[in-house]
Amino acid sequence: MSTLLDVTGLSVNYGGVQAVHDSSIRVEEGEAVALLGPNGAGKSSTLRAILGLIKSTGQVNFRSTSISGVACERIVSQGLTLVPEGRRLFPQLTIHENLMLAARHRKAIQSTYEALLARLPILAERRDQPAGTLSGGEQQQVAIARALMSQPDLLLIDEPSLGLAPTLVDRVYELLADLKADGLSMLIVEQEVIRVLNFADRAYAMANGTIVMSGSAAELRNSDDVKHFYLGAEE
Amino acid sequence: MDAILTYIVNVVSLGGTYALLALGLAVVFSVLGLINFAHGELMTLAGYALLAGILLGVPFWAAVLAAVLVGGVAAVIMETTAFRPVRNANPATLLMTSFAVAMLLQVIFQNFISARGQAVPVPSLFTGSIAIGNAQVSIIQAISIVVSLLSLIALKVFFDRSRSGWAIRAAADDFETLRLMGFRASRLIAIAFLISGLLAGIAGVLWVMQRGSVDPLMGLKPVLAAFVVVVIGGLGSISGAVLGGYLLAAIEIALQTWLPEGLAPYRDSLTFVLVIAVLSLFPNGLFGKRVAEKV
């Protein structure tokens, strides 16, 4: 296994407020890594900083090449992308247009598109419908599909289960499991701690902008601190 | 019957020009959140380019083509020199910058060309009229209808079929997510200005051909109308800009045709009363999105 993403000493400062402080995260090839933490812990800021959407200090390497300070659109072309929190589909564009907007390489894209249509029938059934008319669960599937259209090696996913009913969350995680089986690497920010720890290989826990714990998903699942802080269990 | 036919021809001709101008404003508004008040000066610039071409003895079609291109290129230069440095400033700064650019260009036209209107000798081929039934339609009006409709169809294809077209439609909603799709903000904004400038160029040529002259303040009135159109249609709505263009033309020409002579001085005011009536029924414009108000 080789290291795909290597983040060391990442810090993000929003006008004097330290959102992320000296955080280090690693994702190996083929791995699903969870990033846990309560609201405001700095998880989303970490993802956004890795992708160059916000300014940060520290070192971010992707496939051993530095992407610190590189513009987001260039990072995406290197095989790293984000499914943003709240899906953020373009509501007025059709599903087809949403997907094709992300298709950077025209030649290679047709097979990706057809594979996605086969995997997610909804994409084919409703391809000419505006994305804004889909339900939350359907939108999340389209948002993931759209990210895949840029043919990434590593997918950053911000709160995939946010605002979804449990059965729909199952559907989203089934899709993620399929993608993982195909060898796609992922870094998932999630507040549904049990769900993501059952899915991921490894996990990091953040609080107040710093990484407070890391280890295999099983280790975190059994950790008393995780149970106490995130699952509300009695000690 | 003839009166109605004449009315329709007038509406489609003026409405087409308004739609082209309003679309130019809407495209830039989509990507930058800016109503570019210097849009009218792009139109004027195209008018002067047409005049220069004719005076230099260039074939008329080449002068027209050059004038439209001048509109497009000038818009891109305007964006890179004036708007790019203040791109991330607040909307008021962008708006003031657009006023400054408009005034600067007007002064340049006045001082380096002439404060007075310059006659543009349009070939006699375009000055006649054709009879449709008992109604007379001027050739320039017919050309203006055809050209504006063709431009609108071309734009529709661009917005429906191309990645850049989808991106410009999407930019009004969410620029950041577009960056995740690999779009460079600068490139997309430059494309939007280029389209906007080409549209201003086409509208400028049509306007000058109908009036037969060009003057430094020529762009002022039509761009004000286009601004009204964009507001009626709904800021950021591209189809709204087109329909708004025809709607405003329908109102203006109806008042021009059927308003009793004694009320003629109130024509513009009445137009705006109707616009206010539309906006009080549809505060976000006919096709605008409902925007949650911050209190």
Image (spheres, coloured by chain):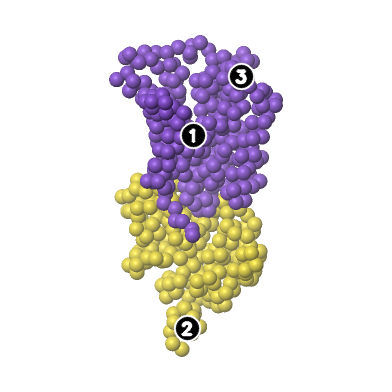
Chain colours: A yellow, B purple
Q: Quadrant of residue B270?
A: top left
Whole-percent x and y of residue B72? 57, 32
Please name the amino acid that badge 1 sits on. Answer: Ala
Looking at the rendered structure, whether the residues under marks 2 and 1 are on a common chain is answered as no
What residue is shown at x 38% (from left), y 15% (from top)? B136
- Front-most of B278 and B17? B278
Q: Residue at x 66, y 27 (%)?
A: B109
Specify whether residue A103 is in view. Answer: no
The percent coordinates of residue B54 (x first, y second) are 60, 16
Please give the label number shown on residue B257.
none
Q: Name which residue lies at 40% across and 29% down.
A: B255
Query: Which residue is disc 2 drawn over?
Result: A228
The chain carrying label 1 is B
| Secondary structure category for the residue under label 1 | helix
Task: Give the SS element for disc 3.
Answer: strand
Picture layout, residue B203 above or below residue A9 = above
Residue B218: x, y in percent? 57, 27
In front of the other: A62 or A160: A160
The residue shown at (61%, 40%) is: B98
The residue type indicated by label 2 comes to His
Quarter of the picture holding the N terminus of chain A? bottom right
Residue most toward the left?
B1
Q: Nearer the viewer, mark 2 or mark 3?
A: 3
How far is disc 3 from disc 1 in space, using C-alphas?
23 Å
| Closer to the camera in the image, A49 or A107 | A49
> Relative to B99, is B180 on the left or the right?
left
- Pointer 1: what residue? B225
Q: Residue furthest right?
A: B112
Q: Which residue is mark 3?
A: B118
